[in-house]
Amino acid sequence: MYIYDSVQKKKVPFEPIISNNVSIYVCGPTVYDDAHLGHARSSLAFDLLSRTLKAHGYAVTMGKNFTDIDDKIIKKVEETGKNMEEITSFYITRYLEEMAALGIARADIEPKATESLGAIEAMIQTLIDKDDAYVISTGDVYFDTSKDSKYGNISHRVADDEDTQSRVAHTSEKRNPKDFALWKACKGEEDICFDTAFSKGRPGWHIECSAMIEKHFTGNEEYSIDIHGGGADLLFPHHENEAAQSRCATGHELSKYWMHNGFVQIDGEKMSKSLGNSFFLKDALKLYDGEVLRYYLNSVHYRNDFNFSEEELQLNKKRLDKLYRLKKRISPGKASSINKNFKKSLLDTMGDDLNISIALSLIDELIANTNDALDANPKDKALKKETLANIEFIDMLLGFGGKEPFSYFQIGVDDALKEKIETLIAERVEAKKSKDFVRSDAIRDELKAQGINIMDTAEGTLWEKA
RNA sequence: GGAGCCAUCGCCAAGUUGGUAAGGCCGUAGAUUGCAAAUCUGCUAUUCACCAGUUCGAGUCUGGUUGGCUCCUCCA
């Protein structure tokens, strides 16, 4: 299969460092607030990657961290009076619940910064010993970017020391303007800090990921992991710095491939805290089913920016509905074996750097063809069973279409309403029998007013929630 | 100021190595239906922001113009 490597800036054949095994590390969230749609998109992108690799026969080990030591978390501690652990565990739990609602599998390894302090300290000490890092008078530890001749290779930034335009304030004790903090010494007594040989303090953001990767992945003599992922905004400086410190500490490259997902935008602008245009996942999940959100957020290629709109979401729901209508048509039943050509086409297109657009069009084609065949021969049992198997495969590979089809169309309808609907439908069937179309149409309108659409089929009158 | 990405039908969106524009929504004509809905069939970009170049041939390559976004500060 092929993936797009954002360091080489092109689509390249994927060859794992250890045959048939794939190690992926994705930068996870800093747990100081609720996850927004952007977090969802990143998780979704790499979930899709993991599923695709597995479907291609690879054994995948996925790592995704939680940054649970950070300035913003400390700020939250000060604001709320709660302790750090209370805050981080609350948001971690919430994050995992929301990702589960989107059909995202848990990572195999979910390291936290607080649980990786030993590895972090060891890596910093190694760098200090090699003089690739240095301690300044305050106790802060900086990485010396001039010691890494390849610094800049990840983001393709010119490794000059000019950066006169940079908005980063310079610390006078830094050897080079580009040097970044590996360790921040604590300033006051109330600071949350940990003891080390070099100073009392806490880790910088970049070192966490490098240390966690070294702790949990073995890699080979050339690379620590196969694929390092994250949002496009992490390319610089985060991934550049990770790569540099790991290279200097271990003597080999951090990751063989780098993949970055595009942003979720609102009205053409990146969704972010500072712009105040965040759409939180918890709010989105109140309004829409997780599966619909998943389908929608995955409908645009992972590398492209995604302009979120509720209208588009509704249109995408209609597209998903068609899959479920077909499933309704062939349910209940037992799946037989999948259509080989369909499976191959889907695997091939997803294997081409996750070409979801083609994958979705293949599914639309399957739906149309199957409906057509079923129109011609409604009792084609073999086709029904094969289609069920095809849909099972879609669910496994792409993560939608797995629900029981009748319940899919009844999401958000309570039992009382269900009973009322059934009663009205029964009444309408009687009215239709006696050709009382005025009454039957009135019932249909009444249901429609409540967001319930009905359709008369060969199998009887069916209803769905709009 | 520096670096990069993007620009395809009314809307969303595919389009590796250049070879003659997927799919969805909407619209529309029909089949089916008591009428609808659902389903199916047909139609719907000689054209890929603009200008120039390379080529037998470019949405795809090169240069430029315009517009949008992102990174250089925490960020998925």
Image (tube, rainbow, N blue to C red):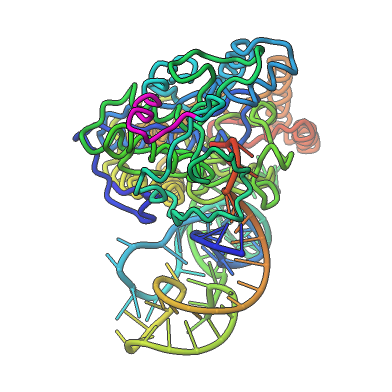
The answer to whether residue A83 is left or right of residue A52 is right
What's the residue at 50%, 43% (across, down)? A237
Q: Which region of the structure is painted magenta?
A: A123-135
Q: Is residue A114 left or right of residue A98?
A: left
From the top left corner, tell me how far across and down residue A369 is, in percent.
41, 48
Residue A308 in the image, given as x and y percentages of width and height:
64, 45
Which of the two residues, A407 or A94, is positioned nearer the viewer here? A94
Q: Residue B12's x, y, as percent? A: 59, 54
Q: Position of residue A330 (x, y in %)?
A: 44, 32
User: Would residue A110 be visible to someone looking at this image?
Assistant: yes
In the image, residue A139 above or below residue B53: above
Residue at 44% x, 53% y: name it: A159
Whether residue A338 is situated above or below residue B51 in the rendered picture: above
Indicate the quadrant where residue A431 lies.
Answer: top right
Residue A463 seen in the figure: no
Q: Nearer the viewer, residue A391 or B15?
A: B15
Q: Residue A133 lies in magenta, yes or no?
A: yes
Q: Is residue B18 above or below residue A97?
A: below
Give the residue drawn at x 51%, y 33%.
A181
Quarter occupied by residue A440: top right
Q: Residue at x 38, y 40 (%)?
A: A244
